[in-house]
Structures are given as structure tokens and as C-alpha cells.
Amino acid sequence: MRALPPVAVVDDVGAEKMHAWLLERTHDLVADLVALAELETPSDDLELLARGVKHLEEWVIERLGEPTGRAAHISEKHGPVLVLDYPGSGSSTLVGLCHYDTVFDAGTLRTWPVRVDGDHVSGPGVFDMKGGIVQLVWALRVLAELGVPRPPVRLVFNGDEEIGSPFSRPLLESACADAAAVLVFEASADGAVKTARKGVGLFSVTAHGVESHAGLDPLAGASAIDEVARVVTTLHDAADLSLGTSINVGTLHGGSRANVVAGSARANLDIRVASDEERARVDRLLASLAPRDNRARLVVTGGWNRPVMPRTAGIVHMYELAGAVAARLGIDLLEASVGGASDGNFVAAMGIPLLHGLGAVGGGAHARHEHVSIAGMVERSALAAGLVAAFARAH
């Protein structure tokens, strides 16, 4: 495990003072979140993603000043990845990991505008995860304003996380490779940070059959739909929620007409596992699939999109550090194991200590009632600031 600050250093970081300073600037945090959320950034719209990351960079520089290092990685198919480096005390870099793409289509704002109502801000992507981006930036801002030492910090903003990070994964791994630890500003789980996440596999099973006339010559055909139906039953029977393994056939496509024995069919799967042992079992299951009719053929494609993020000693220590900062703020910080996956899974697989779920307190991820708590946003900004300061204090 990489050297991490002892929990005792948290007593000296001044989290309470930072929270008071942020509380006085609540209006600014809210205004920044509204501005981010009013720029739609769906994962599949390159023009909107480019516009969104441009605003994001300008805003970060406005709040934190010019970075000492900058890299913008551009793809022809996916959103840009922006990496900004800011100096600090010591040689151990701390990485803040975020994504700015959302699951909401362009035009969503026309029917669901961003709203501020009491303690809530609602709108596309405010919870997952633009609220977390605001919290990270303001955490660094309060450290600078109050003269609290911080370590070198690298900010990583990903534009294709919601579709599995196909372009950004190697860039994220490179940006995190030398990190003392990584703070992932994905949304919390009902206020809890996430100390374990499942691995995710995205697969398709395609059956190739033999077409024939369903009435005149049914025995001449080999039904691809029949083969896929049997596969679906086999897969669903293999799920074991007691071990954290879910196998979901989310979509089925097949056949051409009701009076034709189907020549092709396909099942698309989402598989979640909580351990590498279960991942290996599922791999063996997929490899063993075989057609009932030897005239048909089954082809399995796809793979594991994200590895398992287990609750390691490094993650536990990061949780204890955060819990100590939270206690200074009067927060009883809980932890959770969740079924969703994120870029944090890639970092965990590299053996780097991390803490996940440092982002917004709220709910409604990926739904039209996404919302964040304003008070929670201020509290979590102070929590993040205290956690960052602990790394500088320790060194």
C-alpha cells in the first residue's frame, strides 16, 4: 500500500474553518453548478461535449488560476479528456477524478430546466456528476483562500464515462499512475462514500440458425430464437445475488417474420460481479454455451468493461481519513458497497488507494428527478478540502 497520511493529522487541517468560509459562499457554489448543468453534455454529442469542456476549463481557471500543466486529449468519436495540474507542497500528487458527460440527450433542458428550490438543485446531470465537480473545485479554492497547504493536485475530467470510457481509460490510468491517492467525485450513495463497487461485463450472445417456412417445412429450419431463449434461461438461472452476481438480458432481437423460422437472434447482457472468482465463473459459463440443434451456432461477443473494485486496505484507510474529517464537521460518514461501476474501478485495479463517492448528496441518478442538496454540497466541499489538506500536512 502506498504511504498515506495517518488519521491523526486530520485534527490540524482546520476543516471547521473551511466549512464556515464555504458556507458564506453558498450562492457562488450554486451559481457554478447551475451554469455547468445548463450546458448539456450528452456522451454522444461531440459538439456539445467540446462546448462543455471549454466552459469547464475556463471556469476552473477562473476559480483556481492558471494550471502549471495542461493536456487536452481529443478523439474523433468521444468527448475530450482534460487534465490540469496545480502545484503544491511535497512530491506526492493527489488526483481528483471526474466526468462531465451525462446520460441525458440534447434538448432535455427544454422540458426539464435546471431549478433551484430551497435546499435542492435539480436538472440533467447535477447529481451524476456535475455537483461533484463543483465540490472539488471549491475545495481547492478554499484551501488557496485560507492559505492551507495542499499537495500537488491533478484534475482529470473525462467525457465518455457514461458509455464505459472507451477512449479515456488509458488516459485516466496514465494520469493516475504516479498518484499517492485518487479522490473520485462521483455522487454519494445516500450520503455514504463507496468503498466497494462491482465489476461490469457487457456481452452479446448471437444465434445463427437456418431459415425455413414455418408452416410448409418447419423441420427444415433451426430456430435462432429458440436457441437464444434457452440461453436466456440458462444465464438467468446462473445469477447468484447472494454472491453479488446479477445477469440481466436487457434486450432481445431476432427473426424476420412470424411465418419464418428465425435465422438469427441476439441477446444483450449486463453482468455485475462482486469478486474475481465470480467473474471467472461467469466466463466459464459463457464459454460453455452450446446450441441444442447442431445446425445452429452461438457466438459470444463483448467483454468486461470495468474490473471489480474491492474494499482494500488502502480504500479502508482513505475512508477512515475522510471519516475523521467528517467528524470534525459533525457528519457521521457512512460507507456503502454498490452495484454500479465507474472510472474508479480502473484506478482500484492499479492498486492505487482511492475514495469513491465524494461527490453530491442527493438522488435520482440517470432519472428525471436528479437533484443535489445545497447544504450537502457545501459540507462535502469542506470534507474534500480537509482530506486534500491531510496529504500536505502529512508530508
Image (cartoon, rainbow, N blue to C red):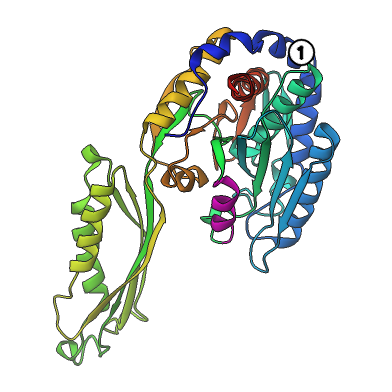
Q: Is residue 96 left or right of residue 315?
A: right
Secondary element under disc 1, as helix, strand or loop, is: helix
- On the image, the x and y values in percent for residue 307 come to 39, 50
Which residue is depicted at the point 79% across and 41% down? 67
Give the amino acid type for the residue marked by disc 1 in the picture: Trp
Query: Against 359, is 324 above or below?
Result: above
Q: Magenta segment: does it hold 175?
A: yes
| Residue 302 image-quadrant placement | bottom left
Q: Quadrant of the N terminus?
A: top left
Q: Is residue 99 visible?
A: yes
Query: Against 39, is 338 above or below?
Result: above
Q: Is residue 122 visible?
A: no
Q: Nearer the viewer, residue 236 or 31?
A: 31
Which residue position holds label 1?
Answer: 21
The main secondary structure of the magenta stretch is helix
Q: Magenta segment: does it hold 236?
A: no
Q: Is residue 53 left or right of residue 293?
A: right
Which residue is depicted at the point 73% across and 44% down? 84
- On the image, the x and y values in percent for residue 138 come to 73, 27
Q: Nearer the viewer, residue 339 or 83?
A: 83
Q: Nearer the viewer, residue 166 or 368?
A: 166
Query: Against 167, is 38 above or below?
Result: above
Q: Is residue 57 left or right of residue 326?
A: right
Which residue is depicted at the point 74% across and 17% down? 22
Q: Specify start and end residues of the magenta stretch as a single range.
A: 167-177
